Image (cartoon, helix red, strand yellow):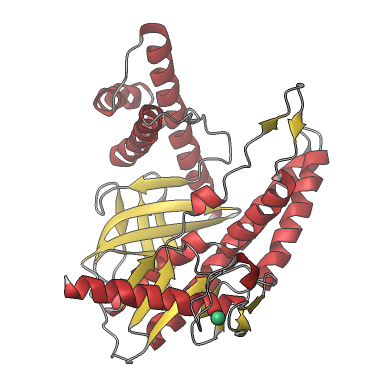
């Protein structure tokens, strides 16, 4: 099984400066490669591929020994491969008849990861194994950087990445052959409804993780963004405001991950089978389509209400949560079932009567058929569980 481990780095001042240069040079490489692809495509209709750019990398390095030549060849290739992936996705979307955005130039601060695709090649995890107390990672051009290793690393380290989040640096290890730790069976099954007030509500009526503190940070982030918009370009105050926004973004991410981990852990510990709704988060967070009114203006399309909902959805971070849950389910040897979310919130869990009117408010459910009342999210979780078990029975019968 594959799993990743993320640790805070404690670089010295000199190492932090080197890390910044490393990121900056990889960003410039990425932008140059993007420019190359764009011009070749625009002027000659030629599609530049990864192989060609990778071959050219040798010359770039030779011409710039004190710049691009300082860094690991393999990490630079990884950056070019990432760009290649972005282009492949772009052309795939074009082919599917959608109108995707062209891969973009990365501005300062919009490029935050460098990956070394193989431990031992321009990088080395645990580079000073004999050190009695501290762990280090060696990065070409940077040195042995101290790692705050707060947990044990399992399996074999495959790739090593560095990541900048606000003012902090992290190392991310992607490990293979991580042994699964199977948990004892509990004999219980649960359906879960994912919501905004609680990240997760179970069919037993348990509410897991109230993301209120996340909403507080989101409010502060919104305020910081408004503040940033008022600052003049190029000023010192603006730089500070940018740093504040970045730090709050990182905090939102950390809180969301933390909440998702807690909820997922509790679910996996307590249940053998977990059923959830298959959500298309990308569809739900899509911008509302403008509706022309025929006179050059636009009709109301609910965009304001929808962007509020967007924020809530992003706040709740269901996609992040489901990813984490599926990893934990796999490593614990549990079972995860996804069901079609249609009608789960408007069907009565007691009698099966399905009507829009059943849903009295966002929070309350009252069946117009049998009078059954419940929390709307618990009612939905019960329906989800039922649908999941039905799917499972059908699969076993087949
Ligand atoms: Zn009913």
- Tell me if 156 is positioned left or right of 71 in this view: left
From the top left corner, tell me how far across and down residue 349 is, in percent: 50, 80
From the top left corner, tell me how far across and down residue 16 is, in percent: 52, 51
The answer to whether residue 250 shows anywhere in this view is: no
Quadrant of the rendered structure where residue 272 is?
Answer: bottom left
> Which residue is drawn at the image coordinates 58% and 83% (left, top)?
370
Q: Quadrant of the C terminus?
A: bottom left
Quadrant of the rendered structure where residue 107 is?
Answer: top right
In front: 352, or 20? 352
Quadrant of the rendered structure where residue 230 is?
Answer: top right
From the top left corner, tell me how far across and down residue 363 is, in percent: 67, 74
- Tell me if 154 is positioned left or right of 163 in this view: left
Q: Quadrant of ligand 1?
A: bottom right
The answer to whether residue 272 shows anywhere in this view is: yes
> Which residue is drawn at the image coordinates 67% and 33% (left, top)?
291
From the top left corner, tell me how far across and down residue 163 is, in percent: 47, 52
> Which residue is drawn at the image coordinates 24% and 27% (left, top)?
51
């Amino acid at each position: 099984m594959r799993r990743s481990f993320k640790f805070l780095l404690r670089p010295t001042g000199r190492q932090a400066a080197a890390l910044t240069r490393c990121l900056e040079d990889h960003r410039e490489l990425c932008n140059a490669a993007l420019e190359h692809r764009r011009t070749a495509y625009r002027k000659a209709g030629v599609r530049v591929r990864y192989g060609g750019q990778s071959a050219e990398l040798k010359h770039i390095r030779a011409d710039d020994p004190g710049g691009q030549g300082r860094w690991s060849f393999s990490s630079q290739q990884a950056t070019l491969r990432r760009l290649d992936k972005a282009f492949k996705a772009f052309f795939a979307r074009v082919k599917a008849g959608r109108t995707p955005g062209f891969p973009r130039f990365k501005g300062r601060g919009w490029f935050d990861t460098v990956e070394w695709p193989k431990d031992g090649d321009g990088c080395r995890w645990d580079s000073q194994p004999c050190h009695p107390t501290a762990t280090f990672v060696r990065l070409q051009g940077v040195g042995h950087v101290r790692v705050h290793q707060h947990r044990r690393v399992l399996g074999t380290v495959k790739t090593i990445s560095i990541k900048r989040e606000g003012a902090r640096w992290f190392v991310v290890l992607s490990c293979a052959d991580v042994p699964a730790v199977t948990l004892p069976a509990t004999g219980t099954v649960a359906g879960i409804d994912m919501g905004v007030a609680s990240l997760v509500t179970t069919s037993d009526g348990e509410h897991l993780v109230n993301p209120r503190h996340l909403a507080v940070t989101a409010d502060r982030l919104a305020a910081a963004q408004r503040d940033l918009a008022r600052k003049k370009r190029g000023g010192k105050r603006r730089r500070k405001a940018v740093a504040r926004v970045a730090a709050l973004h990182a905090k939102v991410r950390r809180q969301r991950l933390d909440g998702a981990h807690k909820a997922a852990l509790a679910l996996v510990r307590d249940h053998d089978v977990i059923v959830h709704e298959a959500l298309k988060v990308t569809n739900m967070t899509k911008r509302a389509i403008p509706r022309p009114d025929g006179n050059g203006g636009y009709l109301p399309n609910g965009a304001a209400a929808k962007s509020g909902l967007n924020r809530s959805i992003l706040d709740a971070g269901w996609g992040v949560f489901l990813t984490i849950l599926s990893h934990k389910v796999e490593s614990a040897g549990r079972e995860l079932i996804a069901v079609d979310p249609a009608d789960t919130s408007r069907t009565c869990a007691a009698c099966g009567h399905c009507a829009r009117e059943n849903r009295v408010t966002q929070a309350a459910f009252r069946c117009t058929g049998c009078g059954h009342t419940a929390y709307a999210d618990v009612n939905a979780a019960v329906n989800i569980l039922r649908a999941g078990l039905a799917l499972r029975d059908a699969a076993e019968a087949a």
